[in-house]
Amino acid sequence: MQRAPHDIKLSVKDFVRRWAPARWWPWLQIARLAMERRTFPRRWVRHTYEGHPLRVLLGDVVGAMWYDHDWTLPELPVLLTGRLKSGSTVFNIGAHQGVVAMVLAQTVGSSGRVVAVEADRFHATLAEANRAANGIEQLVVRHAAVGEVAGPLRHDATTGAIQLGTGPGNSVPAVTIDELTAAYGAPDVIYMDVEGYEALALRGATATLAAGTVDVLVEVHGPWLQRYGTAIGDLLQSFPAATYRSLIFEEGSTRPLPTDLAALARTRFVLVNFGRR
């Protein structure tokens, strides 16, 4: 019986894992990803995202899985109860291929501004292509990582995460949230998804967060915080109760969970912090 291509692919991966030296595996992963991106048949699609019809360039397998269908953004109604409105300034940290940033930009309208920051050059390039194709002038796309301090960081394209120390990965310039504030003005909303680097990225936002006049949504990757020597407590310290009202949501839900240890122990959840001032 003829084997399915998927089965053959898994067999090759198992063979490589078994026989290739462990130190080669990260480099082989990078090579595989580069090949997939070069050979993927790019195409433009039209879908409706949170009520907004948009053109999106599908440039890789992940993009096709995420964006080749209509979808809603469950977090948007939650943010609309706060400072997200027409004319708002939004920082989208970890913007991937710009689809969420475009939805946010359509929400704030031509009188607002969205600054989309993405560490992976491949994704940032697609985000800029998507922005241009839809003529969204109030959206700015920047290729950079957001870090604790300015300076170069290493980005692992195979996981989408910032990599500490040496090893395979691409050097990318880092900017702090406070530097973004200095360049673009104080944000009304920060929307962050940085694959476990959340606590460190927020350490570069001290001045921006101090006033309590910004709403911050963080997609929390609980186990991944540990790779950077941080924990949920480090993340929550950025949002003191006197200045912020914090709510926890399951992914895809608009119903807040109790702020207790059981909720915080979840692998992934959405933390929304509403500035009290």
Image (cartoon, rainbow, N blue to C red):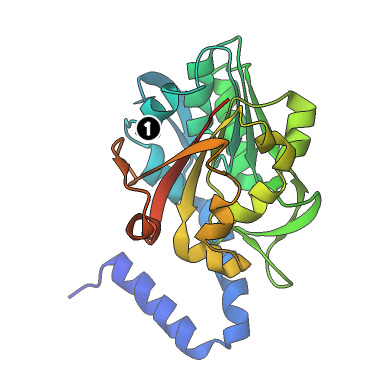
Asked if residue 19 is positioned above or below residue 38 in the image, the reply reads: below
Asked if residue 185 is positioned above or below residue 15 in the image, the reply reads: above
Residue 31 at x, y = what percent?
A: 59, 66
Residue 70 at x, y = what percent?
A: 32, 30
Seen at 41% across and 22% down, the residue is: 81
Q: Amino acid at mark 1?
A: Leu
Res 177 → quadrant: top right
Q: Out of 3 and 257, give the one closest to the viewer.
A: 257
Q: Exactly how many numbered labels are in the figure? A: 1
Kindly state the secondary structure of the residue where label 1 is placed: loop
Question: Disc 1 marks which residue?
Answer: 73
Left or right of residue 55, residue 6 in this image = left
Seen at 72% across and 46% down, the residue is: 204
Left or right of residue 253, residue 277 in this image = right
Q: Quadrant of the N terminus?
A: bottom left
Seen at 34% across and 33% down, the residue is: 74
- Residue extending farthest left: 1
Seen at 40% across and 57% down, the residue is: 264
User: Is residue 147 visible from the viewing direction of this image?
Assistant: yes
